[in-house]
Image (tube, helix red, strand yellow):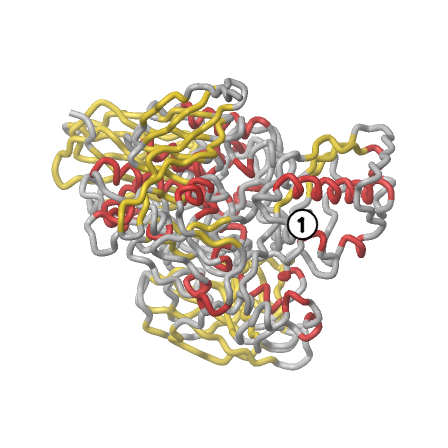
Amino acid sequence: MTTQRQPAEELNFDLVVVGGGLAGLCAAIAAARHGARTAIVQERPVFGGNSSTEIRVVPLSATNFNAWARETGIVEELILHDRATNHVHLFEHGLTNSHWDLVLLEAARREEKLTLFLNTSVRGVDSEDVGDGSRRVAAVHGSQLGSEREFVFRAPHFVDATGDGTVGALAGAEYRYGRDARSDFGEPMAPVRADEVTNGSTITMRARDVGREVPYTPPAWVQEYRSLEEIGPFRRVAHVTRREYGGYWWLEVSNPFHQIHDNQAVKDELHRHVLGVWNYIKNHSPDREIARTYVLEWIGMVPGKRESRRLMGDVVLNEHHLHHDPLWPDRVGVAGWIIDLHIPGGINNHAEPGELSHADANYRNYIHVSPFSVPLRAMYSRNVENLWLAGRSLSASRVAFGAVRVQSVLGVLGQAVGTAAAYALERGLTPRETASPDGPHVARLQQLLLRDDVHVPGVVNEDPDDLARGVPVRATSEAPLDFGAPDTASFHPLATPRAQVFPVTEGRVEVVRYYLRNEGTEPAEVTAELHELGRIWDAGCGRRVASVTLTVPPRFEGWLDAPFHANVTANRPHRATLSAAPDVDWAAASVHPTGTLAQAHYVSAGGPEAHNRHYPSLHPDEIDLPAYERWTQHKWFSLAVQVEPQPRPYAAENVNRGGAWPLDLPHLWVSDPAQALPQCVALDFPEPTTLDTVCVSFDTDLNVIASQLPEFWRAPTCVRDWRLWATVGGERRLVHEETGNYQRRRVVTFAPVTAGSLELEVLTTNVQAGRFLAPGHEEEVYPHEGGSPRDVTATGGDSARVYEFRAYRQHG
């Protein structure tokens, strides 16, 4: 017997990225931009992984649950481009169209140092033992569908972005699969005994109204559902009255199926349930009359995986790191999804909700974590010395993995991996040497990431090449902190303590004024407190700096003063609270200023709520919820307050103070909305300075959820038309002009000039392009959060808004 094989082509690169989901794509683009000759090997014909048109899961983000926390960098660049140019509103999974595929493909093709290998599956890895229990990848073997070509990819470094940890597993990397035992990391949310339970895979669908009756007869093999009760609790069949809609995240299959080895069986099982739900909608649901004219236009043929192998690094993120961020010295990014651990069995578990937070408030408030840092030491294999980890294979416990696994989070962390790999390759370093907290490289890498618009919390711009650092800044105007008039159509009851978080820029807070209503016939007493915080999302009590008791008169509506007269720490976020009080309500503000948010106090005695103890997944052997109290976020609105003296957190000097994201302060310059555009912010150099490159970060409203943005959306807050003026020899000279911008990060170059000052003139913003309403409760924000409509123009969308203004001399 003779076996014939195609000869393999030997290819050499600096870096080989295996896997082309958002994490792998961002890693490859970042590495190529930093000079590494990079190959991206993707087994599918399109990039995007779960977000591609093959699977159609809309990229989700830390800002789904945390205010002002949307990921920036390459992910933001891609999503903003898609939203500005795409004709489809991707409000639900299943609606992704080919435009997104093309956005990703074009982004990859633009990089000169990036070579694409699509339809190329890696099933072989050459690795070798290098001593001390370590291994090294020498090459990966790829087979390309359609071309009959075989490849051997060789490189000094590799990135496993396969989602399944395929390269790592074949190379002998240590990995885990399934749930860790509670004793492994001391995690309350882990079960007592380890097992192979994972989050499941989902197949999405797309339905369309074709305007005429179309009967549906299901195949004999589908799962029959005749009621929502049969589908299971808290599984909502949403959007069925829209002209077209997608669905549904809870159509998920997990154990006893193995998410890798049983992939085809998982697909068949999911089709059984997806078509069963469609049959329910068409033939049995209360909306079946509406559904008469709808067809199932598309159903996925590739399961979207949530979880499989997790490769182990020198740091394994665990549950404690999510609740108590250690601010890792080697941090290279930030995450902030909820601890999202779906129930065992998925849709085959009809007795429990798909996600327990739908049913239990104690659980729901515990799994909501504030943004937390992620270390580089969790992004390479601990025992394969040249293997970086991007995407779902990063080093985490199963519980911690639940808070990092969504696509936008993994995309920005992938950018960090690609940047780190290029940095290491240029200097001949291993991943471990690059990430060493005691070495010189982490700080330099963090500065590179900041320059590329990756948020590394608590790290400020110290780039020695940035000519704008520390120079005096002036602006034509500056906005004060202003919550606008109270929204008297929207009151929030003080059935529980509530709070408003805001920045303080002076060393004193004399008065905080609250807009309250007492509908009772008796006076009500409330306690007002002022807490100093470290970050705007802080859920702990903070440091109490003042407390007063207020009396709210009966049948009262209006402003009530809390005379704190307190010394406070300037340039820190503070929380103004009110205790619970029957019959008393606190009005919402009409403006939701950047870097502010409302909070509510929640107390749990531990364990689930009493009425939920029957759920098997809430049994103490499955999860041991501790007693806790915390301030939870309401990210879509602020509460009506006035602060004296009035803070001024949007000053001009924010543009070169070192930050470009809301964290403790907004770190944003905003011109006075009472003054018309154009408005200017300028750098005044101490002496004439030669420069040829400027980096600017505009405001694209980091609070809105990218997956909910409508078609042709451009952030109203974002600068659209702008100019750069240099003062040369006392004369004002135009060095750059742009119209039609919708991106946050703009890097522009021009002929070198020696300038005494550099002025950024904002001519118009995208507020003229239309208004955006944040999703309301009728639009489910996957998977657990609702929102209240908010008009972005109320935040001052017609103001000039700039996060950062850098200047460089890069040529000559």
Q: Position of residue 51 (x, y in %)?
A: 55, 37
Question: Taking the image as drawn, is residue 665 in sight?
Answer: yes
Q: For the C terminus, give its image quadrant.
A: top left
Image position of 155 with respect to 603: above or below: above
Left or right: residue 425 compared with residue 417? left
Q: Residue furthest left?
A: 687
Q: Position of residue 275 (x, y in %)?
A: 77, 40
Residue 304, by quadrant, is: top right
Q: Nearer the viewer, residue 212 or 152?
A: 152
Q: In the rendered structure, which amino acid carries the disc numbered 1?
A: Trp
Residue 430, by quadrant, is: top left
Residue 588, by quadrant, is: bottom right
The structure residue drawn at horizontal position 14% and vertical position 41%, both measured from the top left corner, is 686
Residue carrying label 1 = 250
Image position of 809 with respect to 279: above or below: above
SS for dot 1:
loop
Q: Position of residue 660 (x, y in %)?
A: 35, 47
In this figure, what is the number of numbered marks? 1
The structure residue drawn at horizontal position 84% and vertical position 47%, both measured from the top left corner, is 285
Q: Residues within 10 Å of mark 1 (few under 14, many from 20)?
A: many
Left or right: residue 355 compared with residue 665? right
Q: Nearer the viewer, residue 418 or 175?
A: 175
Q: Residue furthest front?
A: 1
Question: Taking the image as drawn, is residue 556 in sight?
Answer: no
Left or right: residue 594 compared with residue 437? right
Q: Position of residue 391 (x, y in %)?
A: 45, 44
The structure residue drawn at horizontal position 46% and vertical position 79%, both measured from the top left corner, is 548
Q: Nearer the viewer, residue 564 or 775?
A: 775
